[in-house]
Image (cartoon, grey):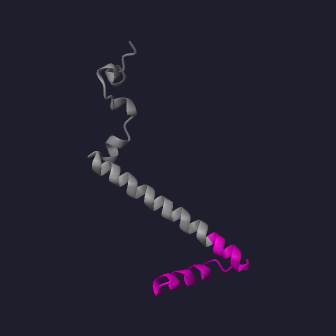
């Protein structure tokens, strides 16, 4: 464990020191760290996909019907059901 990680763990344990056992504090810290890590990885993946598709956040929010790929699917973007 490096000095920076040790300092972070010491700070986190100090913040979580509310009278619960050390095992519960460690579990809580691991859950919080896992949540933050998953959120960050999801954001990075989303940014990578947007960069690869040259898509802006505004275009990403459009309904999928606007992204028809085959001639048969052009009905979904035109709004006609037949």
Name the dominant secondary structure of the magenta segment: helix
Image quarter where the C terminus lies is: top left
Q: In the rendering, at what x and y percent does residue 64 appear? A: 39, 33
What residue sits 37% from the left and 23% below the top? 76
Q: In the rendering, at what x and y percent does residue 49 appear? A: 34, 49
Give left or right: position of 38 versus 22: left
Task: Indicate yes or no whether the magenta region holds residue 72.
Answer: no
What residue sits 38% from the left and 41% below the top? 61
Give left or right: position of 21 versus 81: right
In the depicted view, which residue is nearer to us: 16 or 7?
A: 7
Question: Residue 18, located in which quarter of the rendered image?
Answer: bottom right
> For the magenta stretch, what is the residue range?
1-28
Q: In the rendering, at what x and y percent does residue 70 appear? A: 30, 25
Task: Indicate yes or no whether the magenta region holds residue 4.
Answer: yes
What residue sits 38% from the left and 29% below the top? 65
Q: In the rendering, at what x and y percent does residue 54 appear? A: 26, 46
Q: Is residue 44 above or below residue 80?
A: below
């Amino acid at each position: 464990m490096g000095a920076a990680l040790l300092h972070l763990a010491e700070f986190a344990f100090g913040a979580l020191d509310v009278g619960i056992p050390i095992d519960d504090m460690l579990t809580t810290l691991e859950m919080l760290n896992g949540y933050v890590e998953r959120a960050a990885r999801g954001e990075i993946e989303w940014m990578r996909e947007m960069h690869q598709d040259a898509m802006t956040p505004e275009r990403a929010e459009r309904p999928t019907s606007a992204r028809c790929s085959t001639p048969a699917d052009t009905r979904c973007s035109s709004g006609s059901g037949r």
